[in-house]
Image (tube, rainbow, N blue to C red):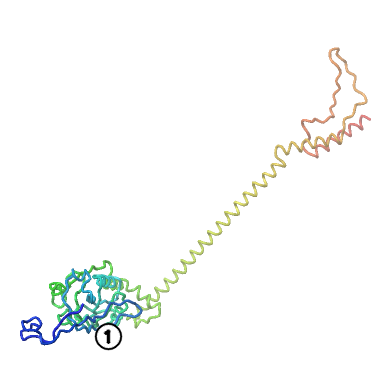
Amino acid sequence: MPVLTTDAESETGIPKSLSNEPPSETMEEIEHTCPQPRLTLTAPAPFADESSCQCQAPHEKLTIAQARLGTPVDRPVRVYADGIFDLFHSGHARALMQAKTLFPNSYLLVGVCSDDLTHKFKGFTVMNEAERYEALRHCRYVDEVIRDAPWTLTPEFLEKHKIDFVAHDDIPYSSAGSDDVYKHIKEAGMFVPTQRTEGISTSDIITRIVRDYDVYARRNLQRGYTAKELNVSFINEKKYRFQNQVDKMKEKVKNVEERSKEFVNRVEEKSHDLIQKWEEKSREFIGNFLELFGPDGAWMFQERSSRMLQALSPKQSPVSSPTRSRSPSRSPSPTFSWLPNKTSPPSSPKAASASISSMSEGDEDEK
């Protein structure tokens, strides 16, 4: 939206166009030329000195309600978020995401404090300022990075970068002799709160490393770092290396045990299969044996043996029979002791042959 301005002002500081006298010069229209939010993510975000806002149009003060309605329509709402951003993590990224999505059309500027300021007011950092700048440039929510940002925001800094609102969590940040460095921003109605991410922070990450220092020292020694690079004494270096060797041996023993268990399991499975197959074959063999030599099969064998004996020694009538006194009431009935009993066949082929030989001897005696 074009903004009207005059070329000169009255001595009282009121523009001539608003005084009683008619303006001596015509008014000019000045359009906003503020940088627009990034639409593509094929390149990192620029630094502020590379793409500073050179817009000459005045930036009217906005309220939070107006910004949330999408006004102004001719320029984005410029939101500023600052911090140290050491060991850039998901908590940082989520805070910047909230700042970026506060309003429908936002341009997010992120200020990163230098090493000197950070070491003076907060403490030593893991990453240096150049590394922290680059980490912010590659965050998708950031449109512009301001290097060497001030610890406390001044009106001159806000005016220079045409900042509309400042985004940060609502917890009072006491530092540099102040109970809350954002107090004057809150009083001016330019502060928009964001929510912290619980369970993740730079201090938490450093605490994990310090707590498990020995583990990470052994890890880096194993990966090829020297004791000098890790600031480890000679005795601790030998201790860590010995512990690494012990861990390797434990791992080998564990692997051997696992492989042995797998081998035993395979052998048990195969033996179970073999036993099952043997049982099935045994049942089949016993069934076949019973079919041949079981109760029915033994009876059939006995019948066949008796038939063979009858064929070998057929029945013959005797030449003479002993004289016996006959009773008038009974008729003579000759008995033959040498006839085989059909109901009780010989138990074996040897017994059958023995009975046959005895019968033949009897016949010879009779002759």
Residue 95: x, y in percent? Answer: 26, 71
Asked whether the viewer can see residue 140, the reply is: yes
Quadrant position of residue 102: bottom left
Residue 146: x, y in percent? Answer: 24, 81
Quadrant position of residue 98: bottom left
Q: Seen in the image, is 359 located left or right of residue 222?
A: right
Quadrant position of residue 60: bottom left
245 vs 95, nearest the viewer? 95
Residue at the disc numbered 1:
50
Q: Seen in the image, is 174 located left or right of residue 272?
A: left
Tell me the crowding category of disc 1: few under 14, some 14 to 19, or many 20 or more residues within 10 angstroms, Cα based: few
The correct choice, above or below, for 314 with respect to 229 in the image is above
Residue 215: x, y in percent? Answer: 35, 72
Residue 296: x, y in percent? Answer: 71, 37
Rendered residue at 60%/51% (across/down): 276
123 vs 165, nearest the viewer? 165
Dot 1 lies on which element?
loop
Q: Quadrant of the N terminus?
A: bottom left
Asked whether the viewer can see residue 203, the reply is: no
Rendered residue at 65%/48% (across/down): 282
Disc 1 residue type (three-letter): Glu
82 vs 272, nearest the viewer? 82
Rendered residue at 7%/82% (across/down): 19
Q: Seen in the image, is 253 located left or right of residue 227?
A: right
Rendered residue at 84%/15% (across/down): 330
